[in-house]
Structure formats: C-alpha cells, structure tokens
Amino acid sequence: MSFTLERETPPLQEDETGAIRVGNSRVLLETVIRAFQDGASPESIIQRYSTLSLSDVYNTIGYYLRHQEAVEAYLVQREQLAESVQHRLSEIQPDLTLIRTRLLSQQGQ
C-alpha cells in the first residue's frame, strides 16, 4: 500500500487590515496561539470559538510550532499596534473619570 504525502498549507488568511485569521473564521491567529500558550487544548479552543474547525486549530498550532520565531515576531508586531491604537484613543478621548464622578454624585443625591 502506498500513498502520496501532500504538503498542507496553513489555514491562515491575511485580511485587508493585515490581521491573520484562522480558517474561514474571523478568529485571529493571536487568539488561537495565546490560548494554546495558556495551556488550552485544540478541543477547548474550538469550544470557545465555534467558527473554527478542529483540523484548522491543529494545523495552526503545528504551523506555529514549526515557525515559532516568525509567528512570535508577528505577535509582537500586533501587540505593538494594539498599544499604539490604545494610546491614540486615550489621547483623543476625554477623561471620563470626572464625568463618572459627577454622574455618581448626582445619582446619590
């Protein structure tokens, strides 16, 4: 009995914003990898994110384990982007603590 081994491409899709999604879902690569790093099994990951398939999660984790350096660099880049966006939002959004304090004091009266 013989069979041909096929190389599988990882089930990863880059969207228009540069974010990498797993399979045909909107679930981010970093979500799956961070869950795996936190000790979640592939089975528990698909329970949390029902749009993922078990094979896509296993393939994604396998890809991560074979290309850890590149995936970690991507994850660091995504974290830096998130921090940058958070910083910009905090600069343009007013300080809500004064408004919250006023509203709470009015509610208490």
Image (cartoon, rainbow, N blue to C red):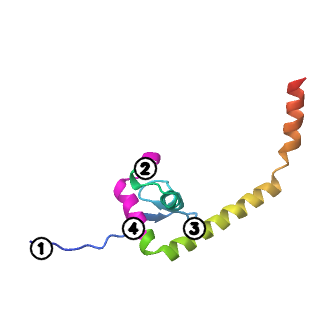
Residue most extreme to the left? 1
Query: Distance from label 4 to label 1 (Cα)?
Result: 25 Å
Circle 1 residues within 10 Å: few <14, some 14–19, many ≥20: few
**What span is in magenta?**
46-63
Secondary element at tag 2: helix
Is any part of residue 11 visible from this angle?
no
Query: Distance from label 2 to label 1 (Cα)?
Result: 35 Å
Q: Earlier in the sequence, mark 1 or mark 3?
A: 1
Residue that badge 4 annotates: 62
* 102 vs 26, nearest the viewer: 102
Q: Earlier in the sequence, mark 2 or mark 3?
A: 2
Circle 4 residues within 10 Å: few <14, some 14–19, many ≥20: few
On residue 75, the disc is: 3
Query: Distance from label 2 to label 3 (Cα)?
Result: 21 Å
Q: Earlier in the sequence, mark 2 or mark 1?
A: 1
Q: Amino acid at mark 3?
A: Leu
Locate residue 52, reporting x and y percent: 41, 52
Locate residue 81, reporting x and y percent: 66, 65
Residue drawn at 90 percent across, 23 percent down? 109
Locate residue 95, reporting x and y percent: 85, 48
Residue drawn at 67 percent across, 61 percent down? 82
Q: Amino acid at mark 1?
A: Ser
Locate residue 66, reporting x and y percent: 42, 74
